[in-house]
Amino acid sequence: MCGITGYVGSRRDAGSLVLEGIKNLEYRGYDSWGIAWKVGESMEVRKDIGKISHLDPAAFGSSSSLAIAHTRWATHGGVTRENAHPHLSCDGTIAVIHNGIVENYQELRDELLNKGHRFLSETDTEVVAHLVEEKMKQTPDFGAAFRKACLRCEGRNAFLALHTQSQTMVAARTGSPLIVGVGSDGYFIASDSPAFLAHTRTVQYIDDGEMAVTDGRSILFYDIATGEERTKREIEITWITEQAEKGNYAHFMLKEIMDQKKSVARAVNQDEEQIRTIAKAIKNAKGTILTACGTAHKACMAAEYFFSVIADKHVNVISAGEFKLYNHFLIPDTLVIVVSQSGETADVLEAMRIAKAKGSKVLAIVNVQSSTIAREADFSLPINAGQERAVASTKALTGQLAILLLIVYALAGKLQEGKKLLLETASAINDLLNPRYVERLQHLAEILKNKENLYIIGRSWNYPMALESAIKIQEVSYIHAEGFAGGELKHGPIALIETGTPCIVLAGNDEATPDILSNATQLKARGAFLIGLAPERNEIFDEWIRVPDVGAAQAIVNIIPIQVLAYFLAVQRGKDPDMPRNLAKSVTVK
Ligand code: M6R
């Protein structure tokens, strides 16, 4: 989940280049940061705990043409300056940064300690710097020694390292993403392209089991296991990659919520022939399984209702972390749909690979088009949300819902009807997100900000949105929030309700409405403070937040006021909604 980036070439500002780059990867982790750059024949290192955003790139690495930088999400070893990357070899000529977990690090560390290496941190990463140093005693070539070190490391990893004496940068991928940016004056290597998009849109992908070695003038790729050279195509990034800027917004989360005025329509703008082909594949498949994590998983759960209600089709939804337990149901005729904003989530990637190993076809609905999932899937549909920087997923979710609904309408033979509904929904969202509406939610956040618990109920596709509402509120405001299916209340959760307990009721104008209102009445009878999110006011609501009536697309509009509410709850409680504690945007560890 860490962010890594590096540069080697003829420029003399490598330190500032990588520092600028790593700021664009801070969404991958923000426990600590670090940078190493070569000056003359020696290495300079700076690292610290906390966020990197406030650092001035100009203060780093003048007259350097080789540098690496890291932003950390801690796995092994606490959040301390010592544990921040880069980690160095004993002689100080090798610096290593890392994303992943070296599972056998303890064994390697003991071995290296016996050989006299000194360790300064508690991390698994540091063993790699010492291991390469040790290998260089027999194999002085840095790239070759690095390959040998990689062969000893178990787990899913991405390493980036520099060696001052040979002016070389080496990257190795055994499970976590790495991408090369081919510049006019050198090479960038990073865990994601935003690290270098300001300098080049020409990329080369390092695939799993491969490494790259560059001195800034040329780059060579190798198979880690065999040492054989690999040839790589250069690819131009042509899809939307606008560098996310906050503009006048205080936080990316609010900016990305507001982006939904346009992004839902962009999600709907898919190649119709491709949508029909996918609908046909679902019709012909012997079983369709949707899988994802977190917020994207809630989109899949909502889609399960779309498939049932609109297309009369049963599909299965499995949380990607549990997918392998169901692998024996997979056959070549199964269609697996994976949904992911980042396209790098470890559990989703693993689910996809399990499905492919069983011969099943995989459709990926992904926002980041350069991601591993988008590239490895048999078919891929872009969410077209634009870069999502805040940890809380907002515009990616509504895009995912829109695409899934479009597929379902196509499956029901009503693609144009679905498209019309979704475009009307997109336009309703544009109207909804006006300053008065946002202020109303800001005011509601004032009322709720000191509550300890908050419950959300829904039925049908609003049930997964109740679960998603809880995620949104928990992750940015740290208020304890839980979502329930309206019908389940009386089987346990209703015991939690006391006078004044805030409960949000997600409703639409559909067959589930009378039942959810009846559940709301049961809460009211126990003293709950009811906040209704519904197209129509109801006398039982203490507060009513109007949402447009958009029929089968209700899940898409109902989640938007919750996103705004969660945002204001975070801000009013003094929390940073873009970088909530303990989380990272892209979860590349299992
Ligand atoms: O990148 P992905 O969509 O695969 O990420 C999945 C989850 O990690 C993600 O949705 C997470 O739950 C969000 N932080 C929630 O807002």
Image: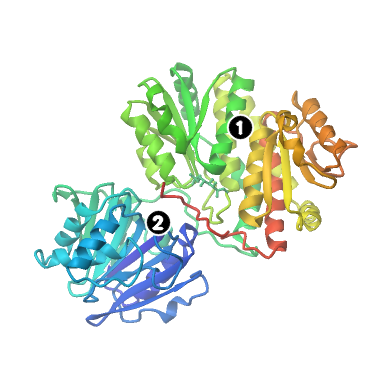
Q: Residue at x 77, y 52 (%)?
A: 441
In the rendered image, is residue 21 in sight?
yes
Q: Quadrant of the N terminus?
A: bottom left
The answer to whether residue 369 is left or right of residue 441 is left
Q: Circle 1 — which element?
A: helix
Residue displayed at 85% across by 45% down: 499
State if disc 1 and disc 2 touch (CB < 8 Å).
Answer: no
Q: Is residue 506 visible?
A: no
Mark 2 or mark 1, whichever is nearer to me: 1
Instruction: Name the N-terminal-most of marks 2 and 1.
Output: 2
Residue 248 coordinates in the image, percent (x, y): 65, 65
Among the 4 quarters of the image, the one containing residue 220: bottom left
* Residue drawn at (75%, 41%) of the image: 496
Q: Is residue 341 above or below residue 119?
A: above
Q: Which of 575 and 432 is in front in this view?
A: 575
Q: From the viewer's perspective, tell me whether residue 350 is left or right of residue 259.
A: left
**Which circle marks residue 193 in the picture?**
2
Of the numbered discs in the image, which one, if any, rests on residue 184? none
Query: Nearest the camera: 258 or 149?
Result: 149
Residue sitting at the far left:
138
- Which residue corresponds to the image point at 59% horizontal and 17% vertical from the top-left? 312
Give the secondary structure at mark 2: helix
Q: Spatial distance from mark 2 to mark 1, Cα to Cα? A: 31 Å
Residue 490 in picture, x, y percent from top left:
75, 30
Mark 1 surroundings within 10 Å by alpha-carbon count, few (fewer than 14), some (14 through 19), many (20 or more): many
Q: How crowded is mark 2: few (under 14 residues within 10 Å), some or many (20 or more)?
A: many
Q: Where is residue 114 in the image (x, y as percent from the top left)?
A: 19, 66
Q: Name the residue under label 1.
A: 302
Task: Give the side of residue 544 with respect to residue 103, left or right.
Answer: right
Instruction: State whether residue 34 is above or below residue 566.
Output: below
Tag 1: amino acid:
Ala
Give the amino acid type for the residue marked by disc 2 in the picture.
Answer: Ser
